[in-house]
């Protein structure tokens, strides 16, 4: 079959992949398609196991001789290790292995910077101990003597770029040595042509992933073969990295992930704990388990980056945008190699001929950032949507109307390449109607009488949720008529097992209850790249459809031979092989399969993305708040979230994603705050008491809405990704609602009572 190059955009990063055009490709499900299973609100296949404790996580695997590993971490944000003495620790009963920079193979350091002689943040790895139990491991850590030479450090990205700032690495603090500059047109010309210009500087804070299940793994060796039971979003990426690190062929490395308790981007790719546990397991010839504790989870396992964004937007009197300019400084952490991408939304969200984004990834003495749900877009949209609102107020325009005015149908404005579908205007209509935008919005912000003021605001979103190859699947029919979907995708809890079974049942023509799904294993399963970037549904479900179609064709071929009929006279529906025009000859699938000598396997994979269109996800959120000007307390009264995700295979699961995204976005803008001691570099909010996550008691009224739209170009299921978009516009919707209530523009959050009260007092003064 022919191979082609196809464009794949994941989390704002574009790559070109060489992929095969499927020999078996299911036709598109059109907007009028009639379904038996797809579209139903079915509960999660694995929901019972998750809530009853039967689910097996990486920490639950137990083997004879299992060792526990603990890591000694740096108390300094920047220091040179002058000496490290492990002699006393080695004598602790039960200790079998200790790793430091003195005895750790340097190829690991080259890949993941494990145990370097210079530590670059509080919590950086200094040593690791494997012992018979946790008590022995911790006792040994206490006996390791380390002599440090403290070095100057820097925590703030703007300070890190000043002349004379401490260097996190010898080559300087700017990742890549220069900023990433992208755009089109002439921004200075566009600003000169504008009748009105809005300028603002916004500090968008850190957000921590706070996974329920800590990062970790359980690793064992069988001869020269390595098996790692991982808490990960990417079994194949971990397999590839472990094979490279231990100089093994990939078929000697197996990575298994059956359940994971949250990831949100932080468990993408291989982590240092996999290398440490793998090396200690090899040296001790014993299985090793290494999992982070809560302090480590919050302190060293990644976070959404802090960004400082300087924004200029110009427009004509009628609201037509003439220029968008962003200069962003992104706190990348100690070891990051490049910046995140807040500039993507500035270039793509609105029609504008002159756009320039300049992104500076800045190294500081804090652990490195990681992708977090909607990476780049969450940070960028907070500043962009605040600026768009302010521009509307300054021009005397309804904030929604200025957004409509600058709507664009093009995913590539320079080349006029259209989107496969775009339900943004419909999302505006649905959300505005549900929240009664025209009636409830104050044309004059802060005009409510009395000390308690109400307001409403909105935020838009764009996200690269089109997916693409590689994704593959098998559909296996056993001789008892049961069906198994096989693919190495990672189920993170958002429901891909469930919709995989639904898509298979629909295309194959069998009852949903007869389908089982096996995933999360690199051995014997077709490859799926990973679970990130909202890629699983639009990447994997077309592959499952193709595999189910292939299996159905083989079933009908077998039935035709068995029944001595023509294949075109047979249909397979609800597990029954029907004979057209002669129902008396119908036969169950189970009876046919029991007569065969082997199983039937259908294979399928994801084909290329369309070359003529761009695939993106859109939506809008609307928020109503109440602000008590006496106390600074902000209360979110209700949220309406309208999202375009193409066809909803299971509307209940889509709504579940909207709920979870709203909760995460509300926590980000309202309560979650990372605080560092600038004298010591220590994270002062390294627990769930000081880092305040929202609870059910903080929940406002939430109304999820799905734009009724099918994408006829994206893939054969008409779907787009939905895992990450719901948290992208949440923060700006709240900030714009607070402005509408008080007339105060907050360019820093979370909106703690102290921060709000201070701003109110400054306004009165």
Image (cartoon, rainbow, N blue to C red):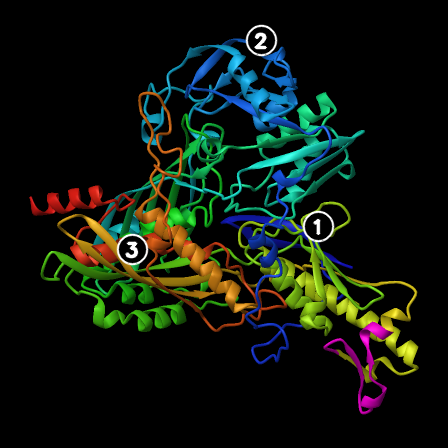
- Which numbered disc, 3 or 1, marks the residue that appears first in the sequence? 1
Q: Which image quadrant for residue 351?
A: bottom left
* 205 lies left or right of 720: left
**Residue 259 coordinates in the image, percent (x, y):** 61, 48
Q: Which of 41 and 603 is in front in this view?
A: 41
Single out the residue that lies furthest toward the bottom. 581
| Residue 643 included in the magenta stretch of the image | no
Determine the residue positioned at 62% across, 18% down: 99
Q: In this view, does 389 lie above or below 332?
A: below
Question: Which of pointers 2 and 3 lies earlier in the amino acid sequence?
Answer: 2
Give the mark toward the camera: 3 or 1. Answer: 3
Badge 3 local density, few (<14 within 10 Å), some, or many (20+)? many
Q: How far apart are marks 1 and 2 (CA)?
A: 47 Å
Q: Is residue 451 above or below residue 401?
A: above
Nearer the observer, 759 or 358: 759
| Label 3 sits on residue | 734
Instruction: Tell me the residue at 27%/51% (across/down).
Output: 191
Q: Tell me: residue 312, above or below residue 81.
A: below
Secondary structure type for disc 2: helix
| Residue assigned mark 1 | 527
Residue 577 belongs to the span the image colors magenta: yes
Residue stretch rendered in magenta on the structure: 573-591
Q: Mark 2 points at which residue?
A: 88
């Amino acid at each position: 079959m022919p191979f082609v190059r196809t464009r794949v955009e994941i989390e704002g990063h574009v790559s070109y992949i060489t992929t095969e055009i499927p020999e078996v490709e299911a036709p598109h499900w059109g907007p009028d398609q009639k379904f038996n299973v797809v579209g139903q609100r079915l509960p999660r296949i694995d929901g019972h196991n998750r809530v009853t404790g039967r689910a097996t996580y990486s920490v639950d695997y137990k083997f004879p001789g299992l060792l526990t590993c603990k890591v000694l971490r740096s108390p300094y944000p920047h220091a040179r290790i002058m000496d490290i003495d492990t002699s006393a620790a080695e004598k602790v009963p039960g200790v079998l292995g200790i790793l430091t920079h003195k005895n750790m193979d340097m190829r690991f350091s080259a890949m993941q910077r494990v145990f370097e002689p210079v530590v670059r943040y509080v919590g950086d790895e200094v040593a690791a101990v494997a012992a018979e139990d946790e008590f022995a491991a911790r006792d040994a850590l206490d006996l390791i003597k380390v002599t440090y030479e403290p070095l100057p450090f820097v925590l703030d990205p703007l300070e890190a770029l000043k002349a004379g700032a401490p260097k996190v690495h010898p080559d300087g603090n700017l990742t890549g040595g220069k900023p990433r500059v992208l755009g089109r047109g002439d921004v200075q010309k566009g600003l000169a042509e504008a009748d009105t210009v809005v300028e603002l500087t916004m500090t968008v804070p850190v957000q921590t992933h706070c996974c329920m299940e800590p990062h970790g793994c359980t690793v064992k060796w069988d001869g020269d073969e390595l098996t790692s039971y991982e808490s990960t979003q990417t079994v194949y990426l971990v397999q590839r990295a472990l094979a490279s690190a231990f100089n093994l062929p990939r078929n000697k490395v197996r990575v298994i992930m059956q359940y994971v308790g949250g990831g949100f981007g932080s468990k993408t790719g291989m982590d240092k704990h996999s290398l440490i546990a793998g090396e200690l397991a090899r040296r001790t010839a014993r299985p090793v388990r290494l999992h982070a504790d809560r302090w480590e989870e919050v302190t060293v396992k990644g976070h959404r980056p802090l960004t400082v964004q300087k924004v200029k937007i110009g427009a004509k009197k009628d609201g037509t945008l003439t220029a968008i300019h962003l200069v962003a400084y992104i706190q990348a952490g100690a070891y990051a190699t490049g910046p995140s991408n807040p500039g993507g939304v500035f270039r793509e969200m609105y029609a504008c001929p002159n756009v320039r984004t300049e992104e500076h990834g800045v190294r500081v003495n804090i652990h490195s950032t990681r992708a977090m749900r909607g990476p780049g877009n969450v940070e960028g949209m907070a500043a962009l949507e605040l600026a768009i609102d302010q521009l509307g107020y300054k021009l005397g325009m309804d904030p929604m109307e200025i957004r409509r005015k600058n709507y664009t149908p093009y995913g590539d404005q320079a080349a006029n390449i259209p989107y496969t579908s775009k339900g943004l205007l419909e999302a505006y209509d649905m959300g505005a109607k549900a929240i009664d935008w025209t009636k409830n919005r104050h044309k004059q912000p802060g005009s409510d009488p009395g000390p308690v003021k109400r307001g409403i605001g909105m935020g838009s979103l764009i996200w690269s949720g089109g997916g693409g190859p590689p994704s593959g699947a098998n559909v296996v029919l056993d001789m008892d008529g049961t069906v198994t979907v096989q693919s190495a995708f990672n189920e993170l809890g958002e429901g891909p097992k469930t919709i995989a079974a639904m898509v298979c049942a629909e295309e194959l023509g069998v009852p949903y209850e007869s389908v089982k799904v096996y995933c999360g294993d690199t051995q014997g399963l077709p490859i799926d790249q990973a679970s990130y970037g909202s890629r699983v549904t639009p990447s994997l479900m077309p592959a499952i459809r193709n595999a189910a179609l292939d299996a159905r064709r083989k079933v009908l071929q077998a039935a035709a031979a068995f029944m001595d009929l023509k294949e075109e006279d047979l249909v397979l529906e609800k597990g029954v092989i029907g004979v057209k025009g002669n129902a008396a000859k119908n036969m169950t699938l189970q009876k046919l399969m029991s007569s065969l000598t082997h199983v039937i396997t259908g294979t399928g994979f994801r084909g290329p993305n369309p070359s003529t269109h761009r695939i993106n996800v859109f939506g809008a959120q609307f928020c109503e708040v109440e602000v008590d000007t006496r106390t600074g307390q902000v209360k979110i009264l209700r949220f309406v979230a309208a999202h375009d995700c193409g066809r909803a295979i299971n509307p209940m699961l889509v709504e579940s994603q909207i709920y979870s995204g709203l909760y995460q976005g509300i926590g980000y803008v309202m309560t979650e705050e990372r605080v560092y001691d600038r004298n010591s570099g220590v994270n002062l909010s390294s627990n769930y008491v000081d880092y305040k996550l929202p609870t059910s008691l903080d929940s406002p009224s939430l109304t999820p809405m799905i734009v009724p739209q099918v994408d006829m170009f994206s893939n054969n299921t008409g779907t787009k990704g939905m895992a990450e978009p719901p948290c992208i516009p949440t923060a700006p919707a709240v900030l714009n609602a607070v402005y509408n209530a008080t007339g105060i523009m907050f360019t820093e959050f979370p909106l703690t009572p102290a921060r709000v009260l201070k701003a109110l007092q400054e306004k009165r003064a």
